[in-house]
Image (cartoon, rainbow, N blue to C red):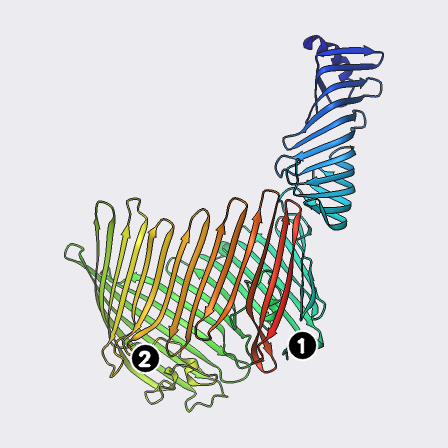
Amino acid sequence: MHKLFLLLFIPFLLLSKEPVEFIAGTISTAGEIVEATDGVEVLYQDNYISAKRATYDKSGELLELFGNVRLLKGERYYMLGEHVSLDLNKNEQKLDELFLQDKDTKLWISAASAETNGSEYSLHQSMLSGCSPENPKWLLRFDEGTFNMKDKWVEVYGATLNVSDVPIVYLPYASFPLDRSRRSGLLRPRMGISEDEGLFFQQPFYLAPDTSWDLEVIPQIRSDRGYGAFAKLRFVDSATSHGWIGGGAFKEKDRYRNKYFLENSVHAGLEAYYDRRHLFDSSLDGSDGLFLDLHLIDDADYYNLQTTDGYDTQTSTIITSRINYYLERETDYFGAYGKYFIDVSKQSNSDTLQLLPSLQYHRYSRVLNDIDLMYSFDYRFKNHYRKEGIGGTQQEVRVPLHYSKSLFDDYLQLDISNTLYLSTINFDSSTPFVDDKGLFLRNSYSVGLSSDLIRAYDDYAHTLHLSLAYSKPEVSLTDGFYSQENRLYEQTNCQVGEPCEFSTFEREEEQVSFLARNYFYDKSGNEFLYHRLKQVVYLDRSFNDFEDLQSELRYRVVDNISFFNDIFYSHEYNKISRTATVLSYENDDLEFDFSHVFQDDLTHEGNYFRTRIEYDLDNKYSLFGFYTYDYEEKEARNWGLGWVMSRRCWSYSIGYREETRPILTKNGADSIFDKTLFFQIQLLPLGGFEYDYTKSDFRGR
């Protein structure tokens, strides 16, 4: 019967623009009308359709299908309906009681009626969701809409968002993609309320016209504080380079500025990042590269106003810009660098010492006269510049010689080295120093013995490295600024304008150093224990002849637990001077770490405890939290906790955090303590939004 039906139907199909194939159990004809029943199947273009009954009007090339119509569009879309009408001549479709689902995202659309003339569907009295059709947790109902299969894009008009059958928000218009490809449009908005800043709203816009670049613009308004906008342009201009350019500004209202005595009425900035290898390779004998990381900002609020989760608050007071260019060849290396520093805790950086520019030439190690003697050469030029105050230029030359020899069948290694170091400095005319120039010449040598041993056991392998070295510097010549009578350039806790600002070389002393490193590996070759012990003894000091003893330990207790500790012990004060400890645990359900940082020496004092936890209660719910405590100040620096629900079609998180936010006032650096309640929801694949409520307290030091 099937074969006879196909033979009878082929003459009608040849009249249409696109071939159509039918399979049916029974067939009947009445003039120009052909009716098929009993398991109707239709193949048309990339559509596969099945229905209980179908009719075909040969004169108008109109195909209609009735009853439990199922349509597969390509490999991605699946549709259901009670009635589908296809005009084969005009390539138009009309559908009643449509149900359409995207196989990849699982998003589905249900419409009372729809029509299409190609890839775009017009939808009437519809609803959509990414959740299960039987009991969707969220649902978007809309009066009219369009769905473009080719562009994978949905637009809706007169929409109402329902969560658990409760209307949440009315949207006169909304549009969103069905895939994760880069495309222009609105990103997730963020909104909130603060007792001091009022209502807050931020709506990012994303522009992606080309695969080589995109632009993100983020305007924001804080009703009681001010308004502003920030933007970032990202680009890829070659196969070995990428970068971005960012900037923006925020204008403070006078009332808010006066309340907190803010130094700046506008928080503005301009930034750029660029990383490229092989910049001029084709015209140079070697390989080269360029790296830019530039920041020109007013204060820390330029960054703090852009944070979206409170965890990226700017805490460092020094912002460093860098420009690096290098040319590397087989035998030598050339570099041109620049560093520009902005101290955001200062009202002016006119007296901040900059390094613009710095030049370097390095000759790689070479063998001298086919013997085991190696030599290299390094030259550096540094221009120390500041707008107001002392500046100067420095030149450094370093020439090391190194001899190495294996002894006792490679059980012992002998290393002998000698390094000649020369430094000259010339200050500008504004220097208050007695000497406006200086010369420093030092020759130092060292002798060392080392051994590397390895032994395999039944369950593990052990590698041991031991070394003992003696070194002694010989100051051959000092003149002017570097004279023996003027040792101010070596002091610690250096202040602006003091000679010590220009001490750019490492101090060397006669010493003996001992180093031991242990590595332990399991049967699979994975390290499970590492320990390093280092001790330096100074031989020409009248006091404090022992440098702090350093012990570093890294231990993987089991697969899920790791421990790290780096500790420094001061022999002079008979106490621990610095230590850093981290304990971590991780499995499928729990991530936890606890850390402690302590420092008590001449340069800094601090004692901080921090812990972080993320725990999955099941495959849907999880908890998170963090806590940082300043033991010296006897206060929490920041802490927070929250709850996360995550399912295939939607997720939300709610939490609370407290944190200290630095600001720059007319009296200098200060801080604001923020308490924030936050809520974030994500409806997949539509997107989501974030809402914050913040209360701020001014520290007012």
Residue 483 x, y percent position in the rendering: 34, 87
Residue 487 x, y percent position in the rendering: 35, 86
Q: Nearer the viewer, residue 254 or 443?
A: 254
Q: Which residue is mark 2?
A: 441
Determine if residue 233 is in view: yes
Q: Nearer the viewer, mark 1 or mark 2?
A: 1
Tell me what residue is drawn at x 43 percent, y 72 percent. 631
Q: Nearer the viewer, residue 678 or 304?
A: 678
Work out which quarter of the rendered image holds the C terminus and state it: bottom right
Q: Nearer the viewer, residue 336 or 319?
A: 319
The quarter holding residue 657 reads bottom right
Residue 499 x, y percent position in the rendering: 42, 85
Q: Which residue is mark 1?
A: 257
Determine contact: label 1, label 2, CB under 8 Å. no
Tell me what residue is drawn at x 71 percent, y 40 percent. 128
With respect to residue 79, does 197 lie above or below? Answer: below
Work out which quarter of the rendered image holds the N terminus and state it: top right
Tell me what residue is drawn at x 50 percent, y 88 percent. 430
- For label 1, the SS is helix
Which amino acid type corresponds to the residue marked 1 in the rendered image?
Arg
Q: Is residue 612 left or right of residue 303?
A: left
Determine if residue 240 is in view: no
- For label 2, the SS is strand
With respect to residue 567, does 495 lie above or below? Answer: below
* Residue neighbourhood size for the residue with mark 1, other residues' Cα within 10 Å, grouped as few (<14), some (14–19), many (≥20): some
Tell me what residue is drawn at x 24 percent, y 49 percent. 461
Q: Is residue 375 left or right of residue 33?
A: left
Which amino acid type corresponds to the residue marked 2 in the rendered image?
Leu
* Residue neighbourhood size for the residue with mark 2, other residues' Cα within 10 Å, grouped as few (<14), some (14–19), many (≥20): some
Q: Earlier in the sequence, mark 1 or mark 2?
A: 1
